[in-house]
Image: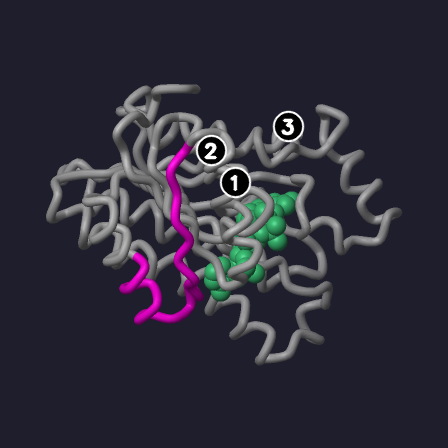
């Protein structure tokens, strides 16, 4: 997709691994300067190195998306260093651990909500404020197929991902006439650190539920993010795009 984001400034949260790292690299390949954000600095800097290796430009800003002051600083640094904020992928998130609903602790619930849902809201708040000043932008929030179907043992995860879709729809409505396009991508199984924690037999069963016969690659999600951030999708607003190998079509 070279050239789709030429001259743009992109920001990706949770870009120290998996889908976020692949998206940061895809942004750079498409021509954007990239701000890489996550809590782990060694892994975040590794993404920056990978972007530089392909001739791109990037910086790392250590950020915990559940902390308002850190998200505020992230957005300000982006504009201070690169001059604008044009395309964003709010991807940072956690799967949580398997627990039936009654066994889930309040602490685990709060942790998931803080990072997955509040973190996405905080990012939107500061990103949109900046985009309003410059007159536009495109934002893609990463939810999950678990935003539209249940997942036994992951009630907190499903609730936060459904919440991201609802939050994004309303945000899209509020800012559509200000030139800011907000959409969601909902992947199903993707080959990242998140799925690497599953026991092999559970992963095999989950994989078999994908009509395409395999789980996704991070790069397949990343290319969809680039498209949603590019002018090629200029009439797509408030959409939850299921990028899931047919998982939710059955
Ligand atoms: N893999 C799948 O099957 C799948 C399916 C559907 C949806 N998703 C969604 O895709 C997104 C990316 O996940 P992934 O599969 O790529 O897994 P991953 O490799 O574990 O990546 C998760 C990323 O989120 C970051 N993160 C977590 N908490 C954070 C926080 N408080 N502040 C900033 N960054 C934070 C992590 O970085 P640090 O630890 O360095 O902060 C990491 O870079 C998540 O939102 C996930 O829910 C994944």
Crowdedness of circle 1 by 10 Å Cα count: few (<14), some, many (20+)?
many
Q: Position of residue 140 (x, y in %)?
A: 38, 41
Q: Is residue 137 magenta?
A: no
- Disc 3 to disc 1, C-alpha distance: 12 Å
What's drawn in magenta, residue-wise?
56-74
Helix, strand or loop at label 3? It is: loop
Question: Is 37 above or below relative to 100?
Answer: above
Q: Position of residue 186 (x, y in %)?
A: 52, 40
Residue under the point 86% across and 48% down: 200
Helix, strand or loop at label 2? It is: strand
Q: Residue furthest bottom?
A: 106
Residue beneath disc 2:
241
Q: Determine contact: label 2, label 3, CB under 8 Å.
A: no
Q: Is mark 1 within 8 Å of ligand 1?
A: yes
Residue beneath disc 1:
186
Crowdedness of circle 2 by 10 Å Cα count: few (<14), some, many (20+)?
some
N-terminal of the pair, mark 2 or mark 1, is: 1
Residue under the point 27% across and 25% down: 234
Residue 159 visible in the snapshot: no
Q: Tell which of 103 and 57 is nearer to you.
A: 57
Residue 191 visible in the snapshot: yes
Q: Residue furthest right?
A: 201
**Disc number for residue 246:** 3
Q: Position of residue 219 (x, y in %)?
A: 57, 31
């Amino acid at each position: 997709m070279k050239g789709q984001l030429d001259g743009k400034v992109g920001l990706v949260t949770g870009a120290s691994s998996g889908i976020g790292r692949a998206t940061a690299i895809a942004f750079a390949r498409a021509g954007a300067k990239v701000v890489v954000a996550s809590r782990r600095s060694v892994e975040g800097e590794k993404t920056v190195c990978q972007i530089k290796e392909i001739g791109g430009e990037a910086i790392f800003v250590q950020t915990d998306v559940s902390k308002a002051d850190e998200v505020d600083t992230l957005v300000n640094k982006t504009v201070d260093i690169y001059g604008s904020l044009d395309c964003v992928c709010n991807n940072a998130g956690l799967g949580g651990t398997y627990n039936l609903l009654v066994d889930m602790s309040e602490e685990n619930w709060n942790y998931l909500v803080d990072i997955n849902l509040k973190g996405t809201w905080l990012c939107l708040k500061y990103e949109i404020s900046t985009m309003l000043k410059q007159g536009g932008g495109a934002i893609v929030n990463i939810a999950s197929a678990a935003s539209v179907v249940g997942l036994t043992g992951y009630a907190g995860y499903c609730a936060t991902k459904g919440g991201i879709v609802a939050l994004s729809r309303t945000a899209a409505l509020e800012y559509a006439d200000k030139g800011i396009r907000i959409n969601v991508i909902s992947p199903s199984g993707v080959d990242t650190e998140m799925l690497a924690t599953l026991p092999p037999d559970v992963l095999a069963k989950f994989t078999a539920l994908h009509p395409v016969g395999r789980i996704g690659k991070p790069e397949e999600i990343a290319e969809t993010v680039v498209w949603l951030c590019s002018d090629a999708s200029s009439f797509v607003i408030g959409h939850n795009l299921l990028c899931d190998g047919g998982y939710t079509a059955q």
